[in-house]
Each structure stands twice: as structure tokens, then as C-alpha cells.
Amino acid sequence: MYPVLRKLLREIEESHFKNITVSEAARKQRLSPSHLRRLFKDAFGVPLAGYMRSRRLQLSLEKLLCADAGLADIAAEYGFDYAQSYIRAFKREFGLTPGEARGSGNIIEVRPPLQWPSRGEIADGAPFGPEIVYTPEILCVGKPRLLPCRDYGEMMESYAREFSKFWLSEKDEIPSAEGQAVYINLTNILEGASGRSLIHTPSVCVADFCDVPYGFERKVIPPSLCVRFRYAGEHHYMDINGELAHGLYSALKAFHGDKNATYSPFHRGTYFERIVPQASGGAYCKTEFYSPVRAAGKKPEWYFPDCGRSAY
């Protein structure tokens, strides 16, 4: 499915964005318009129609500034029904009207076209990011389990298996989880006399900590500045596996290993993953990975942070 988006980006550029609508793009890709819009927004974080309009406006700049064409002709050539529609869209995009752009001599900043992620595909999808975001406080309830750390592949497969177990059965034991179908996975590493252990706490977001059943733990993820990677794939969210997890961890490690990065890891923060199953309707998987950061300047460190403070 996501090679479809890569092909779509190429076709948008090659067609010069003229007379292309979301419906026409969806027909060419053999998808419904709503499905294509959802895939594009999940992958790139911007609406497809808005992106196509933005690219048309940017292409129109050359004719506007270098030719003596009338606004009505330019509007029609670049997919706008009326000159006034073109003028309004142009001002929203660039902060001035086409007439002002022609006569002001100002430098006009344009955004580059979207690019397919340079890190390549993972499994049946691709990672997108990094993005720096500020996350609010998150309340969640989950059941911690100890995973093996002897072999990385074994650990990742155990992670995927435990996620499935929690989501299919254990989360239904949490009364306050009803209607709160957002999955949160917390991780941390414990160092002990017998070696290193990974604590994996599959959880569900809750509005409060009422009626937490025995055997489950309350966790509070505090507000924090994070780097976020998004993954979108052509498979059900229950098909998350070790290959996918390894690919996303690799993207995160590459970000933290960049010596020129503006942000570095923050060891006192909470690392977590977020999945919203209802957002995909089971047709595809949307996953977000968060790792706390702070302004660069202190020694970068790759780590598995504390998995949220307990709240009792």
C-alpha cells in the first residue's frame, strides 16, 4: 500500500499538478478517495488535497513572476475555477496576493515537495519522521511482564506476542478502559545480579484510575518533549512483529546517534509507543514511537528510560 503513496508523490510532480483531484488520484491507485486521504495524512501528517493545492500554487509562481499572463488564465491552468479562488489560496499560502507578489520584489519562501523516507521500507510499510512534539500527561493501566534480553530477535518476537495477548484479552478486564481504545507500550531495562532484563508493560489509556483490577499497574507518563517516529503499514495492527519493531528501534537509534542533531536523549523521560486501532479500521497499521529529548549540548546517550512513574 505504501509504495502506492511513493508512486503518488512521483505522479503529482510529473503531472505538474494540473487538473488533478483527490478522486482522480484515488481512481488511478484503485482506492477510495477517503482511504487515500487517510493513508496520506497518516504517512505525511498533511492533508492530500491541501498538499496538492500547495504544490500547484508553488508551480504557478514561475508563470506569475516571469510571464505577463492574466490571473484568470493562471488560475485556470493550475486547477482553480476562478481568479478569486486562486487569489485567496495564494494569500493563505504565501501571505500576500498574486498582485503584491508581482510588484513587491519580495523573496517568496516555498516548501520543498514531500520525499519518501530515506530510511526505506520496513516490512509492509515505512517509517516517517523524526518530528519534535510535546506530549501531555498520559494515564494508563497495564500489566508488566519480563521479557528475555539474551537474544534481540527473541526479545522482539516476545514483545509482539505479549502485545497481542494484552490487547485481545487482558485489557477487557480494565473497566475504565471501555471506550479508551488507545494502546500504550512502556519499556525499561533492569540491571540485576543475574544480568539485564527488559520490563515490557502493555497498557491502555484511561481517563482515571478507578476500578483498577488486581495484577495491573497504574502508570503516569508526565508531560514531556519527545522525538516521534510514525509508522504506517499495509497490515493489521495485530501483525506487529520483531522485524517491524527492530526497524523502528533502528530509526530511533540513528536519530540519537546524529552528532549534528538539535536534540539529544533525555534519560529521565519515559519511552513509549502508541497505537490507535480504531484509526485504521483494521485495514492498515498506524504506530507512533516516542522518546524524550532535550536541547542538544549534553552528551547523547542511547537508553531505555524509566517506564513511567507508578500511581497508587
Image (cartoon, rainbow, N blue to C red):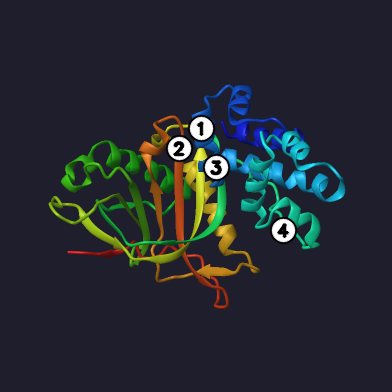
Please tell me the numbered disc located at residue 109: 4
Residue 150 point in image, percent of width and height: 42, 53
User: Residue 92 vs residue 215: left or right?
Assistant: right
Please name the amino acid that badge 2 sits on.
Answer: Cys
Tell whether label 2 touches label 1 (CB within 8 Å).
yes
Label 3 CA crowd tier, 10 Å (few <14, some 14–19, many 20+): some
Closer to the N terminus: mark 1 or mark 2?
A: 1
Label 1, on which residue? 234
Please name the amino acid that badge 3 sits on.
Answer: Pro
User: Residue 28 vs residue 205: left or right?
Assistant: right
Label 3, on which residue? 47
What is the spatial separation of the Cα atoms under label 4 and label 3, in whole angstroms? 20 Å
Label 2, on which residue? 285
Q: In this view, does 63 lie above or below 34?
A: below
Say which of marks 3 and 2 sits in front. Answer: 3
Residue 77 point in image, percent of width and height: 76, 34
What is the spatial separation of the Cα atoms under label 2 and label 4, in whole angstroms? 35 Å
What is the spatial separation of the Cα atoms under label 1 and label 2, in whole angstroms? 6 Å
Picture quarter with the N terminus: top right
